[in-house]
Image (cartoon, grey):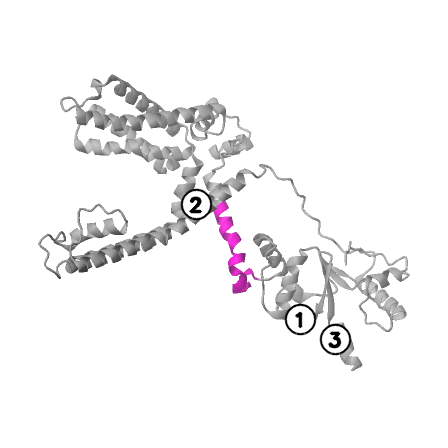
Amino acid sequence: MRKLDDGRWNDHVILNVGGVRHETYKSTLRKIPATRLSRLTEALVNYDPVLNEYFYDRHPGVFAQVLNYYRTGKLHYPTDVCGPLFEEELDFWGLDSNQVEPCCWSTYSRHRDTQATLAILDKLDVEGERLSEEQIARLFGFDEENGKGARLTRWQRSRARVWALFDEPYSSFAAKCVACVSILFICLSVLCFCLKSHRKQSRDDDDDLRSYPLLFYVEHACNAWFTLEITLRCLVSPSLKRFAMSPLNAIDLAATLSFYTEFLTKSSLYLEILSIARVLRLFKLTRHSPGLRILIHTFKASAKELALLVFFLVLGIVLFASLIFYAERLQENPHNDFDSIPQGLWWALVTMTTVGYGDMTPKTFPGMFIGGLCAIAGVLAIALPVPVIVSNFSMFYSHTQARSKLPKQKRRILPAEVPRRSRCLSYRDANDIQFQLVSRSLRSRPPTIGLENVLNLQMPEYFIIGHHNLNP
């Protein structure tokens, strides 16, 4: 029995994590091999031979779950700890975060969705932060030239300023004025495009805008601004490839060319159809509206839900168009509107989207029954994916509002120094002195002494060893 008790106490280990002491057995820590706790030895710098414990300056709340994982084999996630902190602690102890139990996985993995959202917001730059001179220089590659000692030319300095003036509306007050002028010309151009179609319908004898001097001069002024803007932006762009691949720049270029093509050539229906690109200039407002950028990326994030919605609609349209075609032929129906299944496709689309133009209606009882089922299926097919899209938009918008309230600069934290064992006394000598002192004063207790007994012991002057600030 004495040997059994001595073996049990020799297997006993004390872990002090963040001021909270935990007691367990080394055999428990060896249940999960190749981890930090499974390789505990008294030669580690974290070991205190006076208190006979291992000290780690880590989060004590997370370590409670880590130690419980060694005991029970189940890793649970504490709800009062942030996800990245939990992952960092598990990485320190050498554990895999994918071993979290299914009951805690949905709560634990929520921070990954948040980090993905924040990464998207960083790319969007919805907060409208002003770029520093260093960031602009890095964008144009001027920092490398400065590192080589070369001075910037006047063209290089002017190029960066003009680019910030047209592409970064938050860089200066002048850039904001240029953005306001650009928005004004976009709105005027779209308004002229719409009024031009009304004038053409009301006057069949003259389709030329010269008959209306106000619209003529306004549209020419707008296109003169757009020509100047796209030319300057192309000349001062940091990357011509990135400029050409931008969809907004492609729309702007197509709209500008459509104006000159219509102005220099004979008017035709096909050229008027191409001039619809002028209306697409409204998408350029996304440069100045964070809400529009969030909305566009909400649709990108909800691509799976939108694809599922289209799939259900297409499936329902084909199914109910076929059913209504045969259902209307089951009874005598001299006013049958469904002569073919392709005609039924239009009826099914209008019914499932709850529009209901009324140009085609079922006349028989079987057809009415199929029409009712089609309307119910359409409501369900549209209503199910919509909450997911709304939830994504709410998530993007809430994170944007939260980020706008954060401080722009955070306080700098210096890296912590790794503690080192004092070289005044070797580990083996310190262990022998501790064993002799404990054997003299506490023969009735196992070789694990408490803090109150250590303070009462009379230690030799040469026993100099590093200590920790404990809060047991």
Residue located at (22% from left, 21% from top): 209
**Does the image show residue 265?**
no
Query: Looking at the image, which residue sits at the far front?
Result: 365
Give the Cα distance between marks 1 and 3: 12 Å
Residue located at (12% from left, 60% from top): 331
Which of labels 2 and 1 is toward the front? 2
Location of mark 2 (residue): 393
Q: Is residue 221 above or below residue 307?
A: above
Q: Secondary structure at mark 2?
A: helix
Location of mark 3 (residue): 8
Q: Is residue 35 left or right of residue 286?
A: right
Residue located at (31% from left, 34% from top): 280
Q: Is residue 372 above or below residue 234?
A: below
Q: Nearer the viewer, residue 57 or 183?
A: 183
Which of labels 3 and 2 is toward the front? 2
Q: Of the residues shown, which amino acid type is indicated by label 2?
A: Phe
Tell me which label, 2 or 1, sits earlier in the chain.
Answer: 1
| Mark number displayed over residue 28 | 1
Please tell me how crowded label 3 is: few (under 14), some (14-19), or many (20+) other residues with Cα within 10 Å.
few
Which image quadrant for residue 452?
Answer: bottom right
Q: Secondary structure at mark 1?
A: helix
Q: Which residues are magenta?
A: 96-118
**Does the image show residue 127?**
yes
**Count of labels in the image:** 3
Q: Of the residues shown, which amino acid type is indicated by label 3?
A: Arg
